[in-house]
Amino acid sequence: MSEKPVILITGASSGIGAATALYFGQRGYRVVLAARRLERLVEQASEIQDLGGEALAIKADVSSSEQVQALVERTLENYSRIDVLFNNAGFGRMRWLEKLDMEADIETQLQVNLHGAIRTAKAVIPTMIAQRSGHIINMSSVAGYIATPTYSIYAATKFGLRGFTDALRREMYPYNIRVSGIYPGPVKTEFIEHMGSERKSGFKTPTWLVLTSEDVARAVWKLNQRPRRVVVLPGFFSGLIMLEHWFPGLVDWGIERFFIRRERKQS
């Protein structure tokens, strides 16, 4: 039986999930890729296998408890262990709250971004406890620290995920199970294409602050090699998080002055 470690990645069909799967697969991990788009997962798994790695593609929707449980069971049937869970599945709909659809935009974000991560972590924890080892890495966002306009529901899911990550880390400490949160700023992926942002003022994040999927994949690898509670990417956002913590009134003023006035007056 292979002694290679196993990583289970949700949201692995593209972007950060796919890049992380490839990165770990090239470095000796057996990779389980999970998402709703099976054909994309198969392509990703084939690429890893062509490079000499081991990979398994499993169709799974993290908003379904039954599918999550089946995902974990199939992983264990094939590889007998789970060393790392990368809770990466998520999406965002960035519009004013009154313009969001209650089911498609609000409830689905909660189900995937927050409940999905909780479901998947809960499903793998018994295995990790039995192993007395494991690492759960939850993909959050700078929006889990700084809630900005049009990000109301997305920020709610990421604030919730941050609280879940902190509590779970403390729960798992006696079992030698690490729990980490990774908080990137904007990343150039399909996520941006699908978030439905309506920027009438033409405001865009400066390109020097936008990460690539590969940037985040490398950060996930480093985090797994040297576990930490929190990783913020890029480091510039750590300063903004401190500003939000100590001077929230100043942040409110800046957002109202330079964003809200420009966007709302054109609505």
Image (cartoon, rainbow, N blue to C red):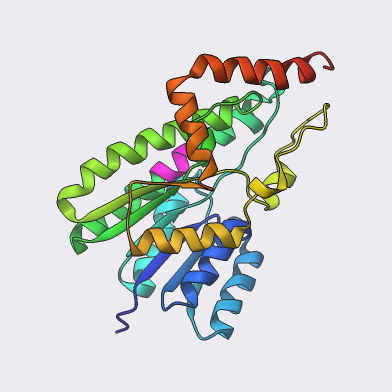
Which quarter of the figure is the C terminus placed in? top right
Q: Nearer the viewer, residue 213 or 53?
A: 213
Image coordinates of residue 54 in percent, x first then y, are: 47, 79
Given residues 261 and 246, the one toward you in this image is 246
**Vertical placement of residue 144 versus 27, above or below:** above
| 256 left or right, relative to 250 | right
Q: Confirm whether the magenta stretch covers residue 220.
A: no
Q: Residue at x 83, y 27 (%)?
A: 200
Choose top left, top right, bottom left or bottom right for residue 73. Answer: bottom left
Kindly tell me whether residue 57 is visible in this rendering: no
Predominant secondary structure, magenta span: helix
Q: How many numbered marks are there?
A: 0
Whether residue 69 is situated above or below residue 28 in the rendered picture? above
Q: What is the span of residues highlighted in magenta in the rendered image?
A: 114-118
Residue 237, compared with residue 47, is above or below; it is above
From this viewpoint, is residue 61 visible? yes
Q: Position of residue 164 (x, y in %)?
A: 35, 36
Residue 117 is a magenta residue: yes
Quarter holding the N terminus?
bottom left
